[in-house]
Image (cartoon, rainbow, N blue to C red):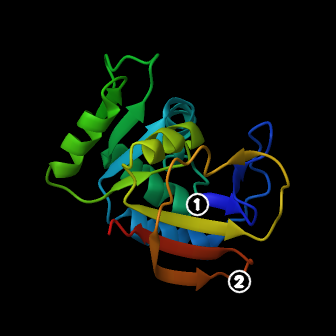
């Protein structure tokens, strides 16, 4: 997830025009994402993704990133947290609208690779409250927003983390990869 130095994932009105991405980041993220087979989204982020990724790789001037991510997106199982969506007719998509704790824990026990949470601050907040996030893969952007939608909100207890890796990118973004230290 992209965040500002002061911990925001979007501006006050949801703007994300401050996020820096380039080919170096796309290549790195593409490699990591290709190791996963399940994507988790909130409704708003899912609808954004669904409006773009299924056909992004088919466009005549599609970038390497668009072609690769579009292919991955079409094959990945998508989980959407929503109280308003229905899964009728959705391909390779599961809608979770209640019993979030039980259903996510059940999915985590199934065979497959890691579940990757994309964006979705409201969904992230719900998952944090239920201790369902096992790690944080953050891309810290070199900007201080001052206000916006925070990544961490209404945390009940401390969440201890263990740093796995860091990586600076030439555009100024720094990747921080943590796992939750459940001890």
Residue found 15% across the figure and 49% down from its top? 110
Instruction: Tell me where residue 183 appears, x and y as whole percent.
Output: 32, 69
**On screen, 173 above or below 94?**
below
Residue found 34% across the figure and 27% down from its top? 95
Does residue 130 show up?
yes
Instruction: Tell me where residue 145 appears, x and y as whole percent.
Output: 83, 56
Determine whether, in the image, residue 25 is placed left or right of residue 81.
right
Alpha-carbon distance for marks 1 and 2?
Answer: 20 Å
**On screen, 103 above or below 6?**
above
Instruction: Tell me where residue 59 appears, x and y as whole percent.
Output: 56, 46
Does residue 55 show up?
no
Q: Identify the image quadrant of residue 45.
A: top right
Read off the residue under disc 1.
63
Image quarter hosting the N terminus: bottom right
Looking at this rendering, what residue extends furthest in the front direction? Answer: 157
Nearer to us in this view, 54 or 170: 170
């Amino acid at each position: 997830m992209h965040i500002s130095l002061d911990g925001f994932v979007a501006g006050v009105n949801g703007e994300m025009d401050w996020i820096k991405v380039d080919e170096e980041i796309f290549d790195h993220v593409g490699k990591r994402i290709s190791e996963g087979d399940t994507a988790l989204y909130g409704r708003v982020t899912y609808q954004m993704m669904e409006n773009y990724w299924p056909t992004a790789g088919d466009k005549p001037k599609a970038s390497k990133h668009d072609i690769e991510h579009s292919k991955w997106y079409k094959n990945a199982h998508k989980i959407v947290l929503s109280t308003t969506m229905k899964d009728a007719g959705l391909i390779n998509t599961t809608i979770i609208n209640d019993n979030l704790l039980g259903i996510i824990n059940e999915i985590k026990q199934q065979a497959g690779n890691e579940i990757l949470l994309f964006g979705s601050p409201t969904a992230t907040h719900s998952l944090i409250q239920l201790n369902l996030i096992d790690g944080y893969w953050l891309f810290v952007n070199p900007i201080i927003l001052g206000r916006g939608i925070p990544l961490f909100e209404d945390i009940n207890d401390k969440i201890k983390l263990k740093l796995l890796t860091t990586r600076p990118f030439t555009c100024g973004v720094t990747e921080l990869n943590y796992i939750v230290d459940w001890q």
